[in-house]
Structure formats: C-alpha cells, structure tokens
Image: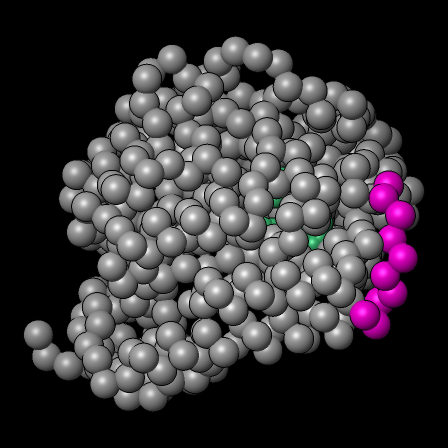
Amino acid sequence: MKEKIINKPDMVKARNRHSGMPDIVYLEDSASAFLLEYAKDKKYFIRTYGCQANVRDEESMRGMLEGVGFSKVEKEAEADIIILNTCAVRENAEDKVYGEIGNLKGLKQKKKDLIIVLCGCIPEEPEILERILNVYPYVNLIFGTHEVYKLLNFIEYVAKHKERLVAVESKDGEVYEGLPVRRTSSHKAFVNIIYGCNKFCTYCIVPYTRGKERSRRFDDVLLECKELIDQGYKEITLLGQNVNAYGKDLDEGKDFADLLEAVAKLGIPRLRFTTSHPWDFTSKMIDIIAKCDNIMKFIHLPVQSGSDDILKKMGRRYTSKDYINLVNEMKKKISGLGLSTDIIVGFPNESDEDFQKTLDLVDEVKYDSAFTFIYSPRRGTPAAKMEDAIDKETKSRRFKELVKHLEVSVSASSESMVGKIYDVLVDGESKNDDQMLSGYTESNKLVHFKGDISLVGQIIKVKILESHTYSLIGEKVDE
Ligand code: 5AD
Ligand code: SF4
C-alpha cells in the first residue's frame, strides 16, 4: 500500500511546553459532497480503551461520522471503517490493542476496502508507531490525540487515494470548540474543561501523548453545560487530567473553584469532576464542594504512594503528610465525603519500608474505593530509565497485600450504608443480570436493584439491603 506521512511523533517536541495562552479554534460545520455521498451506506465500528478523555474523544468522532451519514455497528465484521481509539498508560492496555489489530487481518483480507483506523495515545509513542507501521501494514489511517478534529478529512483522503495516511504531531496542542458530539448516555455527560498535563510525573506517558495543559474558556464550558441541562441531562462530570489546574493558563481570572460554582448554579442535579491532583487542590475548592448541594460529595484523589521517598522520585510534588492534611481538611468540611484514589505498586526500587508506608496511608485514609496498578515502564519517561532491583513476584505479592488492605475500608464503607436510603441515578440494566437495574449513589457506590427499565435516567430513592465489597443490593422505595 502506498503511504503518505504528514507527521510522526517526536518525544522531544512532546516534552516541550511553550508559555502563553492556548490557541482556541472555533470550528465551522463543513462536510464535503464526496463524504456525504460516500457515507450513505457505510457503517463504522469504534472501540475505545483507557480513560474518560478517550471516551469523550470517541463521542466527538461519533458526532463527526454520524453527522455526515455513517451509521454505527456493534460488530467489527459488519463495518466499513473500524476505529481503535487506544490507551498507552500501561503495557497491558497496549498489548490488548496489538491483539485486536492482529485479529483484524482476516477481515481486511476478505474486505479490501475496509478502512482500519488507529488513533488515541498509542500512536504518540515513536517506537510503538514504527512497530505498528512495520508489523501491521494493513492499518490504513493512523493519527494522534491532536488530530481528532480532522477525522473526516483523513477518511476522505484514504477513501479517495487508497493510501495509508500517518498524521501524528507532537505539540502543545490547541483547544477546539464546535466539534459535533454524539453522546453515549442520554442522562450522564462528560464535559472537558482542560486538556493535556504539565505535571510530568516520572512514570507517566500522558503529558507526552496529550500535550500541554490547555483550559477551555469559562463561557464555552458554561454554554456546553447549559445545553446539556436543556436536553435533560441529570449528571455532568467536568473532565481533565488535572481539573485543579483549570484557568491558570487563561487571562480570565477564574479558577476551578469558580467554574465548579458557576456550573453548579446552572442547576444540573448532579455535578462531578475528575481527576484532581493533590498538589493544587485549594481550600477554596473544598469550601465550594461543601457548600453546593448538587456537587457530589465524592473526590478521586490519586495518592500513588505513601512513601515520601517514592513520591519524590515520582515527581508528585507533595509528601504523605501534605496528602493526609488535605484529606483531613476535606473530611472535616465535607460531610458524607466519599474518597477514592489511584495507587502504583512496584515503582523502581520501592523497598519493603516504602511499601509499608503505602499500607499505613491506606489504613489511615480509609478509602471508599480505589484503583491499584503495578508499575509499568513507559518508554521515554524518566522512570523507565531508573534501575529496578525489585522482582515481579515481590511486586505481585505487594499488589495483593495492598488490595486486601483497601478491601477493609471499601467493605466497611459499603456495610455502613445497609439499612439506609440513598438517591441513585439509574443507569440501565445491571451488567451481569438483566433482571436488575443499576446506578450510582451520590458518593459513587454502585447499587443493583429490581425496577422497571423506564426508570433509566431518573434519580430515585433506594434502600440498601445488602453490601458486597464493590457493590450494593437495594430496593426502590417510594419518595
Ligand atoms: N504504570 C502503572 N500505572 C500508571 N499510571 C499512570 N502511569 C502508570 C504507569 N506507567 C496510573 C496512575 C494514574 C492512573 C490513571 O494510572 O495511578 O493515576
Ligand atoms: Fe500522568 Fe501525573 Fe499528569 Fe496524572 S498528573 S496525567 S499521573 S503526569
């Protein structure tokens, strides 16, 4: 297959951070006559891996594709375009994608005009991109996180020229406004408030794949939230790799606390936000969360480790004491607060003492939920060059031990809910039992209960009857 390379990624450029305001680009709706005709009887399949930023990118891509007439299918075999929207945060996420591309080879042989697209974070890593170009010649279109808005132009190019197209530029990135969107849920919505990351934690690939921290203008965020409320949405989650940095790069004199308050005042029943870096979580933010009834009392606050030595090597900018002080202030001011976290086990040369400090912190904070990961070296990050004398067995033993410690507080917090009544936003049928519905409490606990499918999208009262570690069983009660 012939090939056109527009850009390839470059880790030096990906690390660059230019000062100044972000470029904010307001896009106009435009669709070529060619695409409108081409899309008429064509179907697309999309699979997204990784974090909510990718999920929200999928919704933009769906908006663009369906806007010109492509229709969505749930099976790869029925599609004319297959899009893999990838994640590079850990090796296992990467491996899943290789497996998936490998599986598509047979389909491509049967269907010569099938367009296979690889996008998201994986193509942003130079060596991985080369591997994909060499090993999987049947992938037709590869672009990165900065090129999402060009999806339709790229598809038109590939369809017309039958060439492979590669467009992955490493850069600060822009803010694009006005992209179409087709949301996955009709009652819960993600709203981006800040893109990228400037923290450069030493283990993390995200600042390289997603560029500089770029905030959306205050009014643009409010406009999107207002539209969602008018459409009947019940819950908005404000999104960013680090939402606390919101507004620092703009000249509007507004910070994340101001934004939270302004969105809350619009009157959305439930307002959430993720993710918060402990380093720039201010007392002003805590006070706003405590004050506004419709801001959910749930904070995801990744700690990563309880050892000051490891936190320093991770480049996290806080000590375990700073973190505990922050948590104590949150718990004191916000009643009924649910806390969750991310923890990495097995960072290079993490000693038994370091790990014990993580266990001690976990026991002290008493999280309501947590995500735990074994450290995975990411090429191009500083931690990947650190020596590591700790073997795999030790890491997986520690991982299991950490999960056990976490389960104590997670179970206790679930158990404490039994017998009480909570507001639950009904999501849909339970994943494992289509006789049951499921939804989340304000503090983000998953509840299963019997009910009519017409309840989906409503906030109802549920009495908790039974608690399991990671979910609850309840029954609907009348208001
Ligand atoms: N290895 C393991 N976990 C990682 N995370 C980020 N990078 C890595 C890595 N290289 C985890 C962090 C982060 C979460 C989204 O993923 O805990 O908070
Ligand atoms: Fe990665 Fe750290 Fe940025 Fe989170 S704050 S995305 S862990 S670099």
Look at 66% across and 34% down and name the residue there: 200
Look at 80% across and 52% down and name the residue there: 348
Magenta run includes residue 389: yes
The N terminus sits in image quarter? top right
Tell me: residue 85, above or below residue 180.
below
Residue 176 image point, x, y percent: 47, 24
Residue 309 visible in the picture: yes
Tell me: residue 469, above or below residue 279.
below
The C terminus sits in image quarter? bottom left
Q: Which is the main secondary structure of the residues drawn in magenta?
A: loop
In this view of the protein, which residue sits in the foreground, 33 or 282?
282
Tell me: residue 422, above or below residue 103.
below
Q: Taking 446 as reference, is 128 left or right?
A: right
Magenta run includes residue 361: no
Residue 456 visible in the picture: no
- The structure's colour scheme is one colour
Q: Taking 114 as reference, is 328 left or right?
A: left
Residue 257: name its quadrant: top left
Look at 21% across and 68% down and name the residue there: 423
Query: How many numbered circles are shown?
Result: 0
Which residues lie in the magenta part?
385-394
Residue 142: name its quadrant: top right
Look at 34% across and 51% down and name the residue there: 330
Q: Taking 442 as reference, is 144 left or right?
A: right
Residue 93 image point, x, y percent: 70, 56
